[in-house]
Image: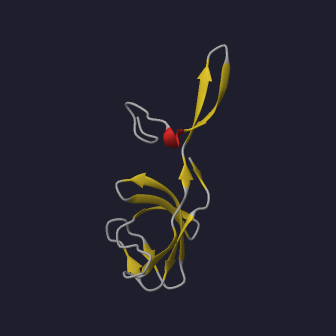
Amino acid sequence: MVVNPVGLVLGIGDFRQPETGVELHAGDTLFVLEEVGEGRWHARLHGELVSVSSEQIDTDGNYGAKLVRAPYSQWWAHFVVPGFRSGWVLMDEVKEHGADACGA
């Protein structure tokens, strides 16, 4: 997974998610690294890896956390054709079967 640019969430007031334990205060920056499905993101807060719910985070900051920029990600997969070639393929337009995103 390549994420560029990472997402940015700015704390504009006191914000706490009871289900994840993530807390933001005015001026805090949450760096959103990737979406992991089911409304969850992996992110960095004060240098620590956290899991955060995208619920209650909007572009208006109605709940104390403002989404300034959503993350942009691309899923690349490495392939090997034995005895022939190997390389990388961008999976955005590939229809895979039996797996979703990076899961099995």
Relative to 23, residue 4 above or below: above
Image location (x, y in percent) of residue 62: 37, 82
Residue lying at 44% horizontally and 42% vertically, measured from the top left: 101
Pick the front one: 45 or 98: 98
- Depicted 5 relative to depicted 14: above or below: above
Depth check: give the residue in front, 97 or 44: 97
> In the displayed structure, does residue 104 sit left or right of residue 29?
left
Q: Position of residue 98 (x, y in %)?
A: 37, 31
Closest to the observer, 18 or 4: 4
Viewer-closest of 24 and 54: 54
Give the image location of residue 84, x and y in percent.
Answer: 67, 16
Residue drawn at the location 54% of the way across and 83% of the way down:
27
Quarter of the image with the C terminus in it: top left
Q: Which residue is at the far front? A: 93
**Total tally of numbered discs in the picture:** 0
Residue that sits furthest to the left in the current view: 19
Q: Residue at x 66, y 25 (%)?
A: 86
Picture quadrant where residue 18 is located: bottom left
Q: How is the image coloured?
A: secondary structure
Looking at the rendering, which quadrant does residue 47 occupy? bottom right
In the picture, measured across the screen, residue 92 lies left or right of residue 83, that is left
Q: Residue at x 61, y 23 (%)?
A: 80
> Is the residue 4 above or below the residue 27 in the image?
above
